[in-house]
């Protein structure tokens, strides 16, 4: 099992960040590199939760999104072709006095088969830099979208 912690600061408010994180419309892959539109399926969406399947490159997972607490967004993996157990994401959003928001994410990857265990090991070591780049690019994409909507 791999646990990765990433951090970024953004000019987006927590509400704007959550809006970007939970926009499951076309073009999601422009914000989230690992969420190809062809994999995206929204099973259910409510005011503070969603049940969504997403993925890319032959890897998919079904995630239960919960943003009922505006400072903590939890994505729990409920099914996947490679990940299981405690897999998921937890975003912590902390508004700062200067108007920015600190975004911390904890990513847990627990492989449920050989491919998943190999990927989990890679994510925790050599692929961590790629995950960090994707995370930073997602934060910047949400920030640009928030600025355009303002």
Image (cartoon, rainbow, N blue to C red):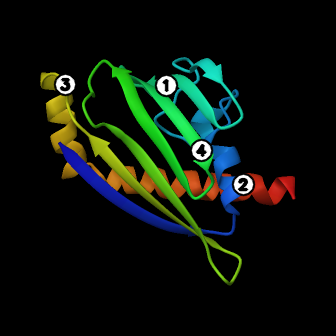
Q: Which residue sits furthest right?
A: 150
- The residue located at (48%, 44%) in the rendering is 74
Q: How far apart are marks 1 and 3 (CA)?
A: 17 Å
Is residue 44 shown to the viewer in this render?
yes
Q: In this view, does 44 lie to the left or right of 111?
A: right
Mark 4 surroundings within 10 Å by alpha-carbon count, few (fewer than 14), some (14 through 19), many (20 or more) = some
Q: How far apart are marks 1 and 4 (CA)?
A: 18 Å
Image point (18%, 52%), residue name: 125
Mark 3 or 2, nearer chain start: 2
At numbered mark 2, what does the secondary structure look like: helix, strand or loop? helix
Which residue is denoted by mark 1 in the rendering? 54
Q: At x 27% / y 27%, what residue is drawn?
A: 84
- What separation in Å lies between label 2 and label 4 (alpha carbons)? 12 Å
- Which mark, residue 112? 3
What residue is shown with label 4?
A: 67
Check if mark 1's residue and mark 4's residue have beta carbons within 8 Å.
Answer: no
Circle 3 Cα neighbour tier, 10 Å, few/some/many (<14 / 14–19 / ≥20): some
Q: Which of marks 3 and 4 is nearer the N terminus?
A: 4
- The tag earlier along the polypeptide, 1 or 2, is 2
Q: Where is residue 116 in the image (x, y as percent from the top left)?
A: 20, 28
CA separation in Å, label 3 and label 2: 34 Å
Helix, strand or loop status at disc 4: strand
Q: Name the residue under label 2.
A: 16
> For the residues marked 1 and 2, what is the alpha-carbon distance in whole angstroms?
21 Å
Q: What element carries label 1?
A: strand
């Amino acid at each position: 099992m791999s646990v990765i912690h990433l951090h970024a600061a953004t000019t987006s408010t927590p509400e704007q960040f959550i809006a970007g994180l939970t926009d499951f419309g076309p073009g999601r892959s422009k914000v989230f590199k690992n969420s190809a539109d062809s994999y995206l399926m929204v099973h259910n969406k409510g005011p503070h939760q969603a049940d969504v399947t997403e993925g890319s490159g032959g890897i998919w997972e079904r995630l239960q999104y919960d943003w009922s607490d505006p400072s903590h967004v939890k994505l729990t993996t409920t099914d996947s072709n490679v990940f299981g157990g405690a897999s998921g994401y937890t975003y912590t959003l902390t508004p700062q006095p200067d108007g920015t928001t600190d975004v911390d994410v904890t990513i847990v990857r627990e492989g449920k088969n050989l491919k998943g265990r190999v990927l989990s090991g890679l994510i925790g070591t050599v692929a961590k830099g790629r995950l960090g780049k994707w995370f930073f690019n997602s934060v910047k994409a949400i920030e640009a979208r928030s600025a355009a909507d303002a």
